[in-house]
Image: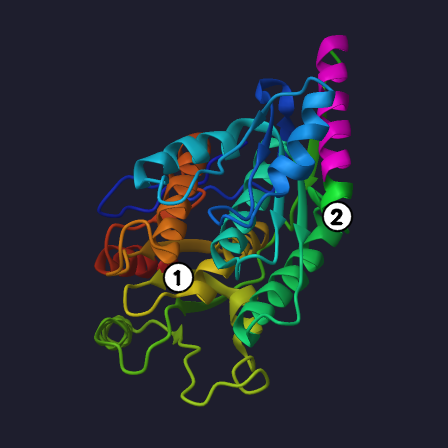
Amino acid sequence: MMHEPGIETTKPFTLFRPREIKTDSIKLRDEVGLFGTCGTPASTWREDIFIPALQRRGLKFYNPQLGPNEWKPEMASIEADHLANDEVIVFPISKETHGYGSLGEAGWAILGALMRGQKLGIYIEEDESMPKPAKRARALFKALATQLQKDYPVFQFEDSLEDQAIWAAISMRERAAMKHSKIRDIRTLKFPKKAETQPCISILGTSVADSAWKNKLKENYEKANVQYFDPYRENWTDTVGAEGEVEHKTKDKVILQIITGETESFGSIAESGLLALSAFVRGQAYGIYIEDHPSEPTSETNRARTLIRAHIKKLNEQFPGIIFLADSIDELQEWSIKAIKK
């Protein structure tokens, strides 16, 4: 894999956008990572369905489910290690929660599976009693993921938890048999060689009217004579709000996602991994800044933010330059101006 020349910023950074990837799963850990809906007393799909199916076949697994109030932010690095190294990953997003954090992690899991050669299965359960934003987040995720899956089939959707448990066990047995026979499972994926991007920076993420940081960002872009796109609309609807947004997300040369503490930002968290994946496939530069929310460190939104930061750091350890994780909005802006003018 070839690394492109780096972009100078306040910290070392290399823009990693190869147009062909060869993966070999030989180095992956012989375990099934049981990711997905976690942290609720009613969420027992692991114990009821997956763990018995894996134990009957003598297969190893990682279970991140903990009891009430047991999760701590420092545990994020352990979860990130398993998401990065387990051979088979399952991501059931069940109806017990709104699942915004799991949707965010699932997008990063797809990008990781593409880069590492992991087998990934996703199940998204739907419930008509959910509030409209939660249903919309699931529908958008599934629509975007399905579109990407057509060209880059590195994961699959399952129709039920039982089906996914069987798939995980069979996939793990197949991988183990291949390793025992020393057959190499090598996969080659090719991406468009010419990135059809437009010289514009998309400012995505937390949407709040008249945010001081966003006004400063846009003012500095105008001083630098840089074109930008702000999707915020005061009266957002599915029709008006989406107008032009998809075009910018898929065409702009630089994609920024800024998740601040002004709101819980569940929608932005849910689409973060898919935005990064889409940018990688299309050759766009993707940078993200994630600020903590003023709620408790173990709140749903802060748990999701901590996990996503951990997943990004693990990806950058394995593939330097795949994501630019900024320490501040100012640093992200400095990087974006250099990226757009590169």
Magenta span: 165-181
- Mark whose residue sits in front, 1 or 2: 2
Residue located at (77% from left, 9% from top): 181
Q: Quadrant of residue 137?
A: bottom right
| Closest to the observer, 3 or 152 | 152
Identify the amino acid type marked 2.
Glu
Q: Quadrant of residue 52?
A: top right
Q: Considering only vertical position in the picture, is 93 above or below 11?
A: below
Residue located at (55% from left, 79% from top): 244
Residue located at (59% from left, 43% from top): 44
- The percent position of residue 141, horizontal first and vertical second, equals 60, 61
Gap between marks 1 and 2, in whole Å? Answer: 32 Å
| Closest to the observer, 45 or 331 | 45
Q: Quadrant of residue 121?
A: top right
Tag on residue 158?
Answer: 2
> Quadrant of the image for the N terminus?
top right
The residue singled out by tag 1 in the image is 256
Q: Residues within 10 Å of mark 1 (few under 14, many from 20)?
A: many
> Quadrant of the image for the C terminus?
bottom left
